[in-house]
Image: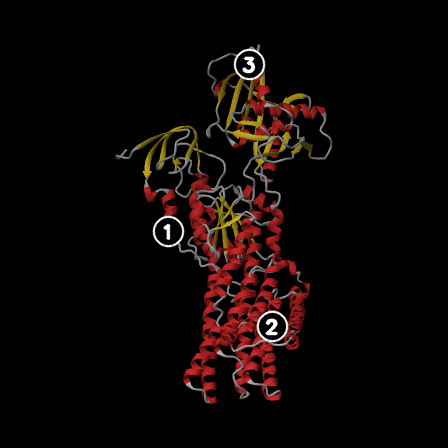
Amino acid sequence: MGGNACVYLRSGNKVPADLRLLEANNLSSDESFLTGESNAATKSTGVLAETVGVSERANLAFAGSTITAGRGLGIVINTGMKTEVGQIAEHVNESESAKPPLVMRMEKFTKQISILVLVISIVLVIMLRLQGLDAAAIFFFVVALAVSAIPEGLPVAVTVALSIAVSRMSKRNVIVRKLPAVESLGSCTVIASDKTGTLTVNQQTARQVALSDGQRFSISGQGYNGEGQFTAIDQTEVSGQAKGRLDKLSELAMLANEGSLIEEKGEWVHYGDAMDVAFLAMGYKLGIVPQRLKSKLQLLDRIPYESERKFSAAFYREEDLTYIAAKGAVETILGLCNLMQYADRLVNIDRVQLEKQAEELATQGYRVLAVAGAQYLGFQKKNQYEDRDLPKMVFHGLVGFIDPLRPEVIDSVNKCKVAGIKVIMITGDHPSTAQAIARELGITEQDELAVTGQQLSEAGATESQEYIRLVSSTHVFARVSPTQKLEIVEVLINQGEFVAVTGDGVNDAPAMRRANIGVAMGSGTDVAKEISSMIVTDDNFSSIVSGVEEGRFAYDNVRKVIYLLISTGAAEVAMFVASISAGLPLPLLAVQLLWLNLVTNGIQDVALAFEGGEPGAMKRKPRKTNEKIFNPQMISQTLISGLTMGMIAFGFWYYLIEIQMMEETYAGNMILLLMVLLQNVHALNCRSEFVSVFKISLSRNYILIFGILSAQGIHILSMHLPFMQQILRIEPITIFEWTLVFVLALPILMVMEIYKKINDKRSKKLQVEAAV
């Protein structure tokens, strides 16, 4: 063997390296961490084509997998980084994680605001120099105004907004590991989801029974329990004869069964092969208890399931009668039968008709198994039975199994569609099964076909037009390898999509790493969790959609904070530019500008971050991937609100200095109070960029109301404290003067209400035109 080591395998062993199997006796292994398939992989010896995907390499045992049944012998072919798991680790290390959307947008925003403040500062320096101010005074004033204009409180407010979203997400079963990921999920345009356990419950369930005479029955309930009942497909009542035949079929399936399903203290406990447990659950729904059934009979021997056999059987004895029960692949069981049960009699088996029934169930996405049995008087008793000892049996029917959909997922997929988010399924399952589930969920249309891993391999490089066409042509990818999943994500990102990838196994790690956001399942591997940005504790797709909603709320709140900070800074700049242009003294001192920035913005921006989510967030289309925070909406509302507040303050300053001939210090005192009140009122405008402030309940953010009152209260208090009066050059005012200044601050509310109304009409008009 060229010096290569051999490894003996048996049930419970962890495979230490990639092995080529030399012997396989009823051998199966759990490779779900690698392939994404929930069922144990059946192993065999032999030679396979090099193009066969990982999930179909039956002659290999992979490092890290667990042997679930049987025994085997394999020769080591790869260790360390050369193993299949090692190759995935290499892809994870080499792949570069995409930047979170919020980080990308904030980087652009900081560059924009820095350049803008620099330009404004240069213009003001020139204007003040022309006014004759000395260099020292100009320097301190421009620095103070720049500090006021730059939203230095933004990092704190953004952190608070994201932290609040993290807390809210945790209540909706989403644990965030990286803070920017909060908003990332809200920005996603594509969710690439695994199937098993995320869209489905990861518990095989018998859903349909087709008796050999063509009678069909549906079975309600899901999962490994006895809750559910049988109903005729044509909605007619299940007759006594049909009930007897269903009982017989279930009894045979239970007898040819090595699984266990028991109810203990109100909870169902199970072990064994998923299909065996599913058969037991089906029997419970008919009122058959396996322990009671088997207690009446003496087990003689079993023929265990093997991939070469494709069936399992059991021999039981009761007095002189020998019972044989068998279940397995349809074509195999058909070959073991010469008769079939037809109503209340036995007839010659009709293979064509039974194969047609099985095909119909398979095209609906069911995994189809057949059940047969026989009883003989005086059947030869042996210590060990083999395949050749099986007599010809009676075919009793077909059972269609499926991993049921989570009931809330259909609604969640619809929410994603309304929100403009594309949902794609990437799974290791069979294409027909994946297609059927995707159609039932509404992920795909009737005529849309799944793209397989083999098709992607044949398409060539990921940059090729054929590869890109395949990725763009479907919402379902089946039988894909971990590398192909990474390539699919790569293509989507290159097309300008913000991609969220869900996963639970080692096989998902490269794609999760490359995606804009990786979402691990709570029941997943440590590798997947370590790579991910967030973890969904209940493995539920609906929780991911809830996370998207919270992410959109978080981004909305970040925008609201930016809107408040930039518009108030713009107001201060507008007021000073207008005053200088009019030849008036500077309205505020440098220390007053810093106080204004500290008291109002420092409290209100953090309070605004607590704003509750706006209804309709999931009805908006995702933001364009190249959209900046300073989009047309932000620019227009910032300019209008900033200029309005600036001109109100300038007008009042002009009135006090030029008309009332008021002393500059006292007039500055009034202007400072006016700016505080303008920002107090404007904070209410910032609660929504679209909805009228009069339609938003105060209860949605009591913290903001408290923050506004606190900011105003602190300023009024400072007007009465001697040491603050000296620092800020302020003094108390009368109630009449405060009321007058408060009334002057109210127009900003009215102006922005009119702006929202006009903007709403324009948006509706554009929507109608787009629909036409």
In the rendered image, residue 742, in percent from the top left (x then y), is placed at 64, 74
Instruction: Report the number of numbered marks.
Output: 3
Instruction: Tell me the number on the disc at residue 677.
Output: 2
| Quarter of the figure with residue 85 | top left
Residue 154 sits above or below residue 505 on the image: below
- Residue under circle 3? 317
**Three-letter code for the amino acid on which mark 3 is drawn:** Arg
Q: Using the image as rendered, state which of residue 306 and residue 259 is in the foreground.
A: 259
Mark 2 residue crowding within 10 angstroms, few (<14) / some (14–19) / many (20+): many
Asked which secondary structure carries label 1, the reply is helix
Identify the element where label 3 is drawn: strand
Front disc: 1 or 2: 2
Q: Residue furthest right?
A: 236
Observer-nearest residue: 689 or 416?
A: 689
Name which residue type carries label 2. Answer: Leu
Q: Earlier in the sequence, mark 1 or mark 3?
A: 1
Mark 1, residue position = 93
Position of residue 589 relative to residue 765, above or below, is below
Residue kind at label 1, given as amino acid type: Asn
Is residue 16 rendered to the left or right of residue 501?
Answer: left
Look at the numbered discs 2 and 3 and tell me whether their residues touch, using CB distance below 8 Å. no
x, y percentage for residue 117? 47, 75
